[in-house]
Every structure is written in C-alpha cells, then in structure tokens.
Amino acid sequence: MSSEIKEKDQNYYENINGSGLYNKKVNLNELMARMNESKKQEKKNNIILSAAAISAVTVFGIILTL
C-alpha cells in the first residue's frame, strides 16, 4: 500500500513539472518596465489630483472674498 502512494505522488509531481507550471523564467526587464510605467502613471495621477485640489481651494477662496 505504501508503494501505491509513492507512485501516485511521483506521477503527480511529474505532471506538474511536465506541464510547465514551474519551468517558466521571470523576465526582469519586463517587470522593471511595468514597474516604471506604473510609477509614471501614479505620478501623473498625483499631479492631476493635486492640481484639482489646489484649484478647488482657490475657487473657494475667491468665492469667500466676494
């Protein structure tokens, strides 16, 4: 009975390794490019949000002075 379990386990791991789930390599250049693109997008969103907040405060201040 113990040999049957070993055979099942061995076949299971062979199927996982054979299917390529763990054989893929990580492309660091692609990951770095994605990270840089994400940072650029985040900076752009922060600038837009800051400009909107400053303009809202400015408009509110102008309305209060009238």
Image (cartoon, rainbow, N blue to C red):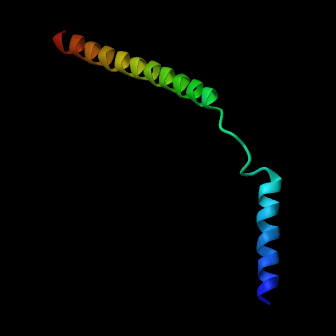
Residue 1's place in the image compared with 16, above or below, is below
Nearer to the camera, 33 or 42: 33
Does 19 sit above or below residue 12? above
Q: In this view, does 40 lie to the left or right of 20?
A: left
Residue lying at 63% horizontally and 28% vertically, measured from the top left: 30
Q: Is residue 37 left or right of residue 2?
A: left
Residue 29 point in image, percent of width and height: 61, 26
State which quarter of the image contains the C terminus: top left
Relative height, residue 62 to residue 31 (above, below): above
Which sits in the foreground, 54 or 22?
A: 22
Quarter residue 5 falls in: bottom right
Q: Is residue 11 left or right of residue 64?
A: right
Quadrant where the N terminus lies? bottom right
| Residue 18, quarter of the rendered image | bottom right
Residue depicted at 82% across the width and 76% down the height = 7
- Which percent across, then down, holds residue 37? 55, 22
Q: Which residue is found at the position 26% from the left and 13% from the top?
A: 58
Residue at horizontal 43 percent and vertical 21 percent from the top = 43
Q: Position of residue 11 (x, y in %)?
A: 82, 69
Q: Which residue lies furthest to the left in this view?
A: 65
Find residue 56 and report its horizontal and vertical position in percent: 31, 18
Residue located farthest toward the front when viewing the structure as drawn: 3
Number of numbered tags placed on the structure image:
0
